[in-house]
Amino acid sequence: MGIVTNYFETCSIILFGVGFATLMFHRNLIKKIIGMNIMDTAVFLFFIAKGYISGKEAPIITNSYKGIEGYVNPVPTALMLTGIVVAVSTTAFALALTIKLHEKYGTIDLDEIIRMKGD
Amino acid sequence: MYKYFPLINVFVLMITAFTIPIVRKKKIARELSIFSNAVILILSIFILVNVISIGDFHYKAGYPNTFFGIDWYIGSIESVLSVLFAFVSLLIVIYSYKSIEHEVPNEKIDFYYILLNLLLASLLGIIYTNDLFNSYVFIEVSTLASCGIIVIKDKKANIKATIKYLIMSTVGSGLILMAIAYIYSLTGHLNMSLIHEVIIKNYTQYPNSVLIILVLFTVGLGVKSAMFPLHGWLPDAHSSAPTPSSALLSGLVIKVYAFTLIKILYRVFSFSIVNETIILNVIILLGSCGMIFGSIMAITQKELKRMVAYSSIAQMGYVFFGIGLGTPAGVATAVFHIVGHAVTKSALFLCSGLMIEKVGSKKISDLKGIGKEMPLALVLFTLGAFSMIGIPILPGFISKWYLSLACIEINRLSLVIIILTSSILNVIYYFPIIINGFFGHENLEGKVYKSKSVSIDRMLPIIFLMTAMVLVGGFSKNILNFISTAF
Amino acid sequence: MSAENLLAFIILFPSLCTAIAYFLGNKDEKIRNIFLIFVTLINFVAVLCLFKYIKTDTVEISVPYIMGSGLHLKLNSFRYIFVFITSFVWFIITVYSSQYLINYIHRNRYYLFFMITYVSTIGIFISENLLNLFTFFEIMSFASYPLIIHDEDEKAHSAGRTYIIMATAGGLVLLMGIFILFSYTNTLDINELSDILPYLGNIKYVISSLFIIGFGVKAGMVPLHIWLPKAHPAAPTPASAILSGILVKTGIFGIILTVVFMMKCDIYLSIFLVIVGFLNMFTGGFLAIFQNNIKKNLAYSSMSQMGYLLLGIGCIGLLKDHQAIAVYGTLFHVFNHAIFKVMLFMGIGIIYMVTHKLDINDIQGFGRFKPVLKLTFFIGFCAIIGMPGFNGFASKTMIHHALTEAGHLNHSNLAIIGDILFYVCGAFTTAYLFKLYTAIFVENNSRYYASYKKDINSRALFPMVASAILIVIFGLKPNWFLYQFEGINEIFNLHNTGVFDINFYSFSNIVSALITIGLGILIYVFFINKKLITIVDNKKVYVNPSINWFNLEQDLYKPILIILFKISTVVLHVVDNIILTFYNFIYTLIKYISNIEFIEFSSLINSINNNKKETNESKFDYSTLEKNIENRTEFIKTTVKEDLKDARYKMNSITYSIFLLGAVLVFILLAVIIFK
Amino acid sequence: MFDFILILPILIPFITGLLILLIKPNVKKTEKYIMFTVIVNFIITAYTSFIYKGLSFHILKFNNLLDIYLAPDTLGSIFAMLVSVLWIFTTFYSFDYMSHEHNLNRFYAFFIMTLGITLGIAFSGNLITLYIFYEMLTLCTFPLVIHSDTEEALKCGRKYLLYSFIGAAFVLFGIIIFFSQTGNLDFTAGGIVKLFNNSNKNYFLMSYIFFFIGFGVKAALVPFHSWLPSAMVAPTPVSSLLHAVAVVKSGVFSLTRMTYYIFGWKIIEQTGGNDYMLVFVLLTILMGSFLALHQQNLKKRLAYSTISQLGYIMLGLVVFSENAFIGGMLHMLFHAMIKITLFFCVGAIMHYYHKTEISEIEGIGKSMPKTMICFTIASISLIGIPPANGFVSKWYLAIGGLELGAYFVPIILLLSALLTAGYLIPVITTAFFKGPPSSEVDIKEPGNLMLMPIIVLTCISVITGFFPNLLISVLQKASSVLF
């Protein structure tokens, strides 16, 4: 039953699985990084879903203050902003390294890279 | 006043890190780093003194007196670790002052010091913080920074190793973040103390969730701290990195994640909760496997630094072993092992870096007769190896001793055999280097006494580290007692 | 000098002089020889001087703290007999050696060990403490070893090996006895032991049998005698003489101490000794008949004579209150045997000195025209066979009496068997010596007509003559000898039952002696002459059929020892290398596994795919595959080792690391949730 | 007040050793330093053993566990005296023996350092101190073992190290279990176990067995002995030290400490651990002497002989009676003297005649009579023929065994003695009674520096054989507190 009602969580777990599978089964480095990103996204979704309370507004006061009960929990959202930043920087770093790798090895296929031994 | 010292510590390092690109001069970058490290060492010592005399304290960054501000907690372990980290990194930075040019391209040296400062700042942050998400952020920063100090050498092997490290630890981070999300959904808090209060009351209602959280944390942090069999990245990364980086990574970085695991297992959760689950058995199993297989892998290595790196995996096995025992004594010994091993392993890495630099080869087989060419370096290396093997007084012995006692305390005698087996395996891979270095007719033929030895000022950091190591061993009981007050 | 000093003197003086003589010998051999003759003479005189003290009294010295247990020496008339013959024999043998050894090498070494043996032998006879006795016993055993292997040839070394193994083993058995004895009694004083040991229960039999075995080796007791016939021929003659004359007596001395003094004549031991005594007499005598090597002949003869002594000791035990005759008989025979056996050996030595041959066939007729030699040898011959008028007669008669009496006392029918055996063994003695005598002194051999005056001088003949005189004196006046040792009565607690007025030359005694001799001659005529002598080229040739007979050493001890040795070697080698073997085993196993070849899975699949293509993709033909497998051409073969290497390399890759991570994650999750 | 004097015998050799390593003086000077150190050490040791008894000194006391504490008692003093006396002889001997070797500075440096460490073992007042010195001993003797620096030497050295460290790990295991049950490691006569009941009986049993096996590795307990024959690659002075004093005796001494000062024999008897160990010990005795028969190399033969003789000493430690203890300790002393003499003699043969096999030494007794006579006397002592000293110890061992009704003890002892005779007497007979007659052989004795130690040691052996009572009374004093 939990799967149906907690569809945010279910979705994020599936997403995480997809990301992990991508990470595992693809030889291409770029695809691996994409998988990584999908995983991260899954976690963000999961986290933010924890803060979401259905029927409540986002904690942005547009008209009048509705009291604490009126808004969703803003903390996860705020945290995930940080998380996204971290993820982006990691991705950027990974991509930069990929470029370096391509420079040195001429390929981003990990299997091929493994076969090329040496410094 | 002293309550601000932790914050000042982190800030000093960060500010230094961001000043360096402005200055962009190698010399100043180095001196600034030495200065910043010296400052945090002094401040850390102040913190330690205060903790000893007054007791542990909290520091609320941001919003004091609220439950959602970022909380830093400095207890006995934190203060000890912060002194340790500051001390070791100061010595490594001093060491790098003279030797970094040999390994890092000239134009990147200032960049290197930015990363060093940033790394240390994040490490200290992880130690101090009492907030889960805050520690996640610092963990990410430290991961990136340590990736940086590996890849800075700009060689094929480095890039390959870094990308492996990066991907692995990103997955680890993902798991950690997932776990944090879980725990947040259970408790609604991110502050460890508050989570603890909530979870201690309610954990029986969510047995599976607690287990999943524990597993996610264990695996996530395990990847980062090279728990067997998630260590795949470590030998590559640590052996290909520049020597000061290797020392820093092996000595400090991997330890800090293990410490985070301790915090989560025993501070967020508690001994009683954790002991009810099977997770400790898993940790102890993996720790033991790490101890044995890490050593066996080390025996088969042909490169010196790789061997020392595998030895790190084995030594992390001890830490996890201690954590897995699930008793205050075991965990305190694990922390003590972190301290002892940090000092020892960084010194060993610096020594081997020095030898590799002078000999010009990474191969162990090329290091024969090195004891004649650079006696002091090999003597220091030998001392470090003794600690690993477990010669009394040295910290390696002490941690084995107390770990074994902790095992017997919970009637698990068979675990002691694993500890001793691993120490014998240590003999097998450390001693050939020493023996072939000092002795053997063929080995010494044609070698000239002290022909490759370096000036004493380059050796000084290693000497200091070794001295510290002996002192850590000597005053082990005091350190352990102090650490134990945390539990 | 007081008696105590004299007692110390007779052991300290020769030991000191031994050292002096050794250094003298390095300078000048002649002086050394004369010096040693004087030393042994002085010692002999000192022993004679002691006589007046011990005749009724005992002389004791004890020095604490030496050798852990202290030194306790004691001399009484019982021990005096042994000391006396030792010093006497040594004196004459020293004189004899100075002549005999002229052509030998390593003379200095010989004299050194000769003298050490002397000191230690005296030591054995005068020690009251068992540990002292054992000490001297061992010193004697080891010191006599260089005498046996003096020639340093293969034969000597072989004999020496047997001797040293037997002696050491015997010594250790003895030591075992002493260990157990001490742990039960806490004393080593023989006098005190006699009050404790007989009341110990069954352990006393263990102790005493260990003692008897230990001493029995020295005494040439069957079946521990094997060293004796080997060592005698190998050693130079003076050494053989003392071996036969004195050293075997140390064993007898020890057995007397054990059985008579310490065990208070235990009945079972006595019976045992009587049996062993007969065995010895019989085997020794029987085997001696066949020997062609004259020294071997005499060696077996010694064995046989030791049988008489063992029999005598056994009789002491059996006779209980009437043991006087057995005691005197045994001790007298000890005395007599020493003298006549030494004399016979010296005679043979002279022959050997001239001819350098020992085989009876080679030296046939040597003595035909050498009157002094012939006469003295004849006297020795008569003595040993117990011809009336010679000393052997007296002692044998006494032992015979003792035996008969023992039979009477115990009303045993076995007494008759014993009597017959006694006669038979006596007859053997006559037979083998008669063979020897006729061969050497009666046969005619032209090779030895020449005179050998220059080779045989008075220093060699004098000792023989001296002992011949003693033989005759004691033979004619045996009672005189007995009177001298009245003190023995007290020592053995004897009720004097008229030993002193035995009429040795009674009709019955003489008749029985003559019967024995006659029997012996019959054996010679009908057995030796017929079976052991063949005529080749008009010459008598003695054959020895016993050479191929069952030999205790070759056919029993050696195989057993070798089998034991081999088994323990295998077992202990395994123990020795157990760790290394284990290590090697595992190492080899791993190596073996890592070198197993197998077909790489992927190439198998490839091959199947290829097959599919070949067979028009419709059906799969197994026979082709089998053929391929047989040929093994298309498959890539690989070993476990290479595979592992490959795997390790792959494991290091990013993909595998992530795989591993996933696996670990899933594994732990499952484990944790299942084993909650 | 004078307690600090205890540290001197340990420290002085160390300083000398380091000095030699650092300054690298020429050989003559090194020899002078060594001679000086050895003699000074002897004087101080004698001083602490005879005059200022009962000293104790904490070198470093971090806490109750890490407490490096020196407190020689009677037993320790005896061992210390043995070590320092025999070291003097070895020193003089090695001056001559090593004169043609290379790398003398390293040799002498570690040689003298080993002295300090062995004295440390003798003086140590608790198990941790003992363990530290025990580990250091392995490390310090290693350069001596591999002195020739050949590939084979290195291989054997590695074997030695590995065995020693595995042994040490066993010991550590034992210590840890023991410490977890008692929390105390100070040497106290009669043991320090306070609480002994059924629940911790197995802990003590296990601890004892691991201790015994661990220390037994150094004491060449079968089947952990095979480093000892391999260590024969070392130069003779080293082998003699390894065999006679430093290493194996340290193992035995540690075993003594462990048996009587840590556990206390009553506790061990209640656990029954000694019965298990007895099997090993008896096997050691038999195997050593039996396999010695098979060795053709003189040094190897002596090595196996050492294994067997060490079994005797260990026998005194598993058979709990006062006499057996005295016997074991006496044998420790006597065997040290005897074995060192034997090795010196063999070394002299090797040095002057370059002969190592038994078949090669035919008639060598004729060309070096003094040496070989000493060899003979020592052999006879080893066999245990009275009045030589080896007999005395055997006597006490056997009596001690019989007191407890253990008949197999004397039987095994005597069997082994027979085997001992079997492997030593052929050496003597070959040396003296084979080969060319003495008139054709030139006498060439070793130099005085080599010969004197041999002769003096032989004299000591003989004297102690005739008058063992002094030593026995000292040992009785030591044992009276234990039983």
Image (cartoon, coloured by chain):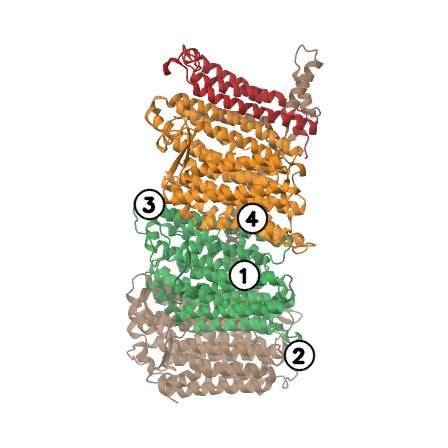
Q: What residue does disc 1 label?
A: D302
What whole-number distance in Å separates the C-alpha atoms at marks 2 and 1?
A: 58 Å
Tag of residue D200? 3
Q: In the figure, residue C65 lies in which quadrant? A: bottom left
Chain that the image shows in green: D
Please state which of the two labelled residues, at mark 4 or mark 1, is closer to the viewer: 4
Tag of residue C446? 2
C618 or D42, nearer to the observer: D42
Please state which of the two labelled residues, at mark 2 or mark 1, is closer to the viewer: 1
* Figure quadrant of the C terminus of chain C: top left
The residue carrying pointer 2 sits among few (fewer than 14), some (14 to 19) or many (20 or more) residues within 10 Å by Cα, namely: few
Question: Amino acid type of disc 2?
Answer: Ser
Question: Amino acid type of disc 1?
Answer: Leu
Q: What residue does disc 4 label?
A: B461
Q: Color used for chain B?
A: orange
Q: Color used for chain A?
A: red
What whole-number distance in Å separates the C-alpha atoms at marks 1 and 3?
A: 42 Å
Q: Color used for chain C?
A: brown
